[in-house]
Image (cartoon, rainbow, N blue to C red):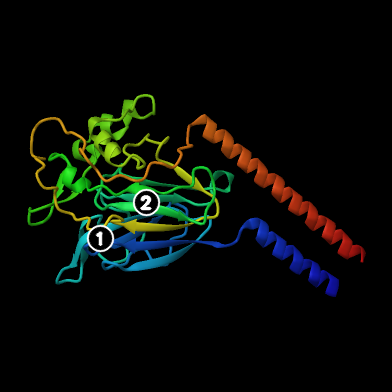
Amino acid sequence: MEQLTLLFSLLLTLHLSVSGVSSTTFTIVNKCGYTVWPGILSNAGVSPLPSTGFVLQTGESKTISTPTSWGGRFWGRTQCSQDSTGKFSCVTGDCGSGRLECGGKGASPPATLAEFTLDGAGGLDFFDVSLVDGYNVPMMVVPQGGSGDNCTNTGCVADLNGACPSELKVMSEDGTEGVACKSACEAFGSPQYCCSGSYGSPNTCKPSSYSQIFKKACPRAYSYAYDDKTSTFTCASADYTITFCPSPNTSQKASQGQNTDSPSPPQAPTSPTTVDTNSPMVYEGAAFDQSLMSASTCIHVFRSQILAGIITVAVSLWGF
């Protein structure tokens, strides 16, 4: 009986090791000169996290633990308040729950999104910062302690609220400043901009003059639906820091001296603050898929070897 107990304990320990039962931590940091109310939405079919919305004053941070198989998105809400009835709402990024907690509701565009799928193909975490639903707050995602050729920081730290074309700009309630920048899809609803209908494939939906404004300012962020090759990143065994306004003194006010009300075609910002682009970009379609298959194969071989070891140990103990 003692041998069986020892065997069960050993098998359980090895199983937990193979399964990778642990957690991934996300540290959310607010370096903006204003308050940000982060929101969190888990992907469909994924259990929601205990916290789905909270407040971060300037300089504050909060660490959240998630299962390694979690997937979802983070974003920042700005200019939030509570009315006389207790209803909570935000000028940008509002999730429509009427409360501080989003409770399973997503961000109302425009909003800068940090998207994650943990423990995906090949055991890798897939993540990106997306401007497909527009932009409201500068954001940076930095992996901590991870590994992989494409495991690097990504984000959008430029002030796109200031550089936003007038037809995409969302103004503050008092009309004095730009607080968000819509996507062309939200602003115009055209299939060409939304990558829908006859434009619903990578071959037919191409970058627009509007998405190129986002892409030039933030080359590592998703600028439209099929902007995959330079915008998706992968890590193994990483934790993540998500920082709002990683550059000091980022404001929501329009840039000085820019005539964004001009009816002329929108131009990209002349001198945006961009993410460091010195790290290598590895995501190149088919070649990237092949590397994932190799990683997956290695994991299966590794698990097979461990299972073989388990059987060997079991047989030895049983024979003893």
Residue 161 appears at what percent x and percent y? Answer: 19, 48
150 over 196 or under it: above or below? below
177 left or right of 16 in image: left
- Front position in the image: 157 or 171: 157
Confirm whether residue 184 shows in the render.
yes
Residue 307 appears at what percent x and percent y? Answer: 75, 53
Residue 81 is labelled as none
Q: Quadrant of the C terminus?
A: bottom right
The residue lying at 18 percent from left, 43 percent from top is 163
Q: Which residue is mark 1?
A: 32
78 over 287 or under it: above or below? below
Which residue type carries mark 2?
Answer: Ala
Q: Earlier in the sequence, mark 1 or mark 2?
A: 1
Which residue type carries mark 1?
Answer: Cys
Locate residue 215: give its quadrant: top left
Q: Which residue is mark 2?
A: 114
